[in-house]
Amino acid sequence: MTDVYSSDDIDPLSRKRGFFALDLILELETDIDVVACADAALAAMDGYFGSEIFYAATLKIVDDETIQGANAEFRHKDKPTNVLSFPDGTDDGEALYLGDIMMSLDTVMREAKEQVKPVEEHIVHLMIHGFLHLMGYDHEEESEAVEMETLEIELLQTLDIKNPYEEKGIPRD
C-alpha cells in the first residue's frame, strides 16, 4: 500500500481466492458485508484471470472526506468519487502486487440508491472495476471503455449480477 494511505493501526482482513489475494482495510463501520462482496469479486476475477501468476492487491474502504482528499491530491479533482486505483506492478517472486484500490462507501451507497440497485452488487462491480484498472484496463477513450465495460459485464454475469451499463446499450450476452 502506498505510504500515504497505510494504516498501521488497522489490521487488514486478508482474503484469498485461487490466484488472487486481497488485503481489505475497513476504515469505517458498516452493516454491509464488505467481506462477502470482496470474496465475490475475487471469485469472478480468479475465474477469468486465474493462471500461473499470483496477484495481490489492497482495498481500503473509506468515507467521502478521505477519498476526496486523495482525488484532489492525485487527480486534481476536489470532490468525492466512488473508487480510485493506484497501480503498482511490483513482482516479489511470489506475487505480482497489482496495487491499491480506495473505495468510498458513502459515494457507493449514494450511487446505489440513485441507480436503484442493491448496494452489495454495486460494491462488487466497483471492486472488479478497480481490479481491472490495476491490471491496465482504462476507459478514457471510447474503445477502451467498451472493452473494459464489456469485461466487467462478463465478470458480473458469472455472479448473476445485472449489467450495470444497460442504459448505455451494451448488450449483456
Image (cartoon, helix red, strand yellow):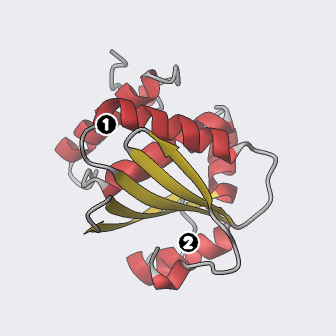
Look at the picture and state if 98 lies above or below 67. Answer: above
76 or 134, which lies in front?
A: 134
Residue 154 place in picture, x, y as percent = 36, 26
Q: Tell me which label, 2 or 1, sits earlier in the chain.
A: 1
- Quadrant hosting residue 6: bottom right
Q: Residue furthest top?
A: 173
Amino acid on which the number 1 mark rests in the picture? Gly
Answer few, some or many: residues within 10 Å of disc 2's Cα (few below 14, many 20 plus, some between 14 and 19).
few
Residue hosting label 1? 50
In this image, 51 relative to 69: left or right?
Answer: left
84 or 159, which lies in front?
A: 159
56 or 135, which lies in front?
A: 56
In this image, 81 relative to 44: left or right?
Answer: right
Q: Residue furthest left?
A: 143
Q: Residue furthest front?
A: 94
Could one spot residue 21 in this view of the protein? yes
Residue at 33% from the left image edge and 20% from the top image edge: 171
Residue 90 place in picture, x, y as percent = 28, 69
Does dot 1 land on a helix, a strand or a loop?
loop
Q: Quadrant of the C terminus?
A: top left
Indicate which disc residue 79 carries. 2
Look at the picture and state if 78 lies above or below 20. Answer: below
Is mark 2 in CB contact (under 8 Å) with mark 1? no
Answer few, some or many: residues within 10 Å of disc 1's Cα (few below 14, many 20 plus, some between 14 and 19).
some
Could one spot residue 115 in this view of the protein? no
Amino acid on which the number 2 mark rests in the picture? Lys
Q: In 3D space, how far apart are the residues under numbered discs 2 and 1 (Cα atoms)?
A: 35 Å
